[in-house]
Amino acid sequence: MDINYHNLSILRTTIDTKFKNAFAATKKDDYNPFVMDIPMSTETVTMPFLEQLTGMREWIDERVINNLRADKLSVTPKKYELTYGIPREAIEDDTYGMYVPIIEQMGIQAANLRADLIEEILANAADAYWVDGKKFFAADRKYGKNTINNYSTNALTKANFKTAYDLMTEYKGHGNTPLKVHPTLLVHGPSKRWEAKAILDNPQMESNGAALPNDTYNLVQHLEVPGLGNKWFLFATGNGAYKPVAYFDRVKPDHIVREDREQDVNVFMEDKYLYGCRGRATAAFVLPHLAYFGNAS
């Protein structure tokens, strides 16, 4: 086709429509049970945490002030982009249709940014740090005088699942009061699908040839996440306003940006029309007592 303003406008509309339709139609991830979305309007968001995690107390004399930590969790989003080039000849010769599936794939990949970042921090959980400078998952974190042990290298077995569950329900805060953590979700990789089903989905278990009631049947839900290998997590997702993981969304990658004018350098120098998308976001673990990590090799 002739490359003129009218025909380029038609091409732009086609590309925009294909991208937006693919973005909107892409199945959203299943991670809402353990992820809270936090929109950002500035370059950095700072989340304060209570210095003393405790419950209400009997008011006998003066109030006890629960101060916000000085070392808050500061989060800065990272930039992400995906760009494709269409040769000028493809437009001149009306063969640009072969590039339309690539534009649709770009929309799918852009819609998957949230899932990709969540899966990335889960896969690299052993390297995550918290506001106190310690690794987020540790066996010796202190809330006051109480230990918060949310880390092991144990494999996902029924016995290890029960150990993690019991540990979380026994957590106490700075005031030596129970944190009332109630685990609700087991997250695991595909390789641990059948172990998770055996622990949680079977109403009965076999012991010495006899069928006995399964005491962990339906105790929590379970969710499969790709890329975890043998790693597994036990999350508490219903404890107040916080969830174990936060997704910080600054700019959604929900539209096309382009360089397809005659005066654009890439068109003039390389005979190539560029179409891409960009986003700014990040994900982070939030509160250690809401997440237990089985870092099995």
Image (cartoon, rainbow, N blue to C red):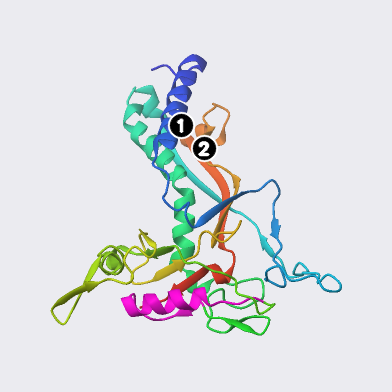
Quarter-of-image position of residue 264: top right
Residue 122 image offset from top left, x and y in percent: 46, 65
Q: Residue 123, can we see it?
A: yes
Whole-number angstrom distance, CA of label 2 to CA of label 1: 7 Å
Q: Residue 131 or 64: which is nearer the viewer?
A: 64
Front-lying residue, 247 or 15: 247
Q: Quadrant of residue 63?
A: bottom right
Residue located 42% across and 30% down the image: 21
> Does residue 157 appear in this view?
no
The local crowd at label 2, few if under 14, some if 14 to 19, many if 20 or more residues have their Cα within 10 Å, is some
Earlier-in-chain disc, 2 versus 1: 1
Name the kind of residue labelled 2 in the image.
Asp
The answer to which of 76 and 59 lies nearer the viewer is: 59
Coordinates of residue 125 in the picture (x, y in percent): 48, 70
In the image: residue 163, left or right of residue 283: left
* CB atoms of marks 2 and 1 within 8 Å: yes
Query: In the rendered image of this protein, does residue 69 appear above or below residue 265?
Result: below
Looking at the rendered image, the quarter that the N terminus falls into is top left
Q: Is residue 231 a member of the stretch shown in magenta? A: no
Q: Magenta residues? A: 150-173
Residue drawn 48% across the image and 72% down it:
292
- Looking at the image, residue 156 sits to the left or right of residue 273; the answer is left
Residue drawn 51% across and 55% down? 35
Q: Residue at x 62, y 83 (%)?
A: 146
- 212 on left or right of 134: left
Numbered label attached to residue 172: none
On residue 254, the disc is 2
Which residue carries the number 1 mark?
A: 20
Looking at the image, which residue sits at the far left?
A: 209
Q: Residue 151 colored magenta?
A: yes
- Seen from the viewer's position, the closer of residues 249 and 143 is 143
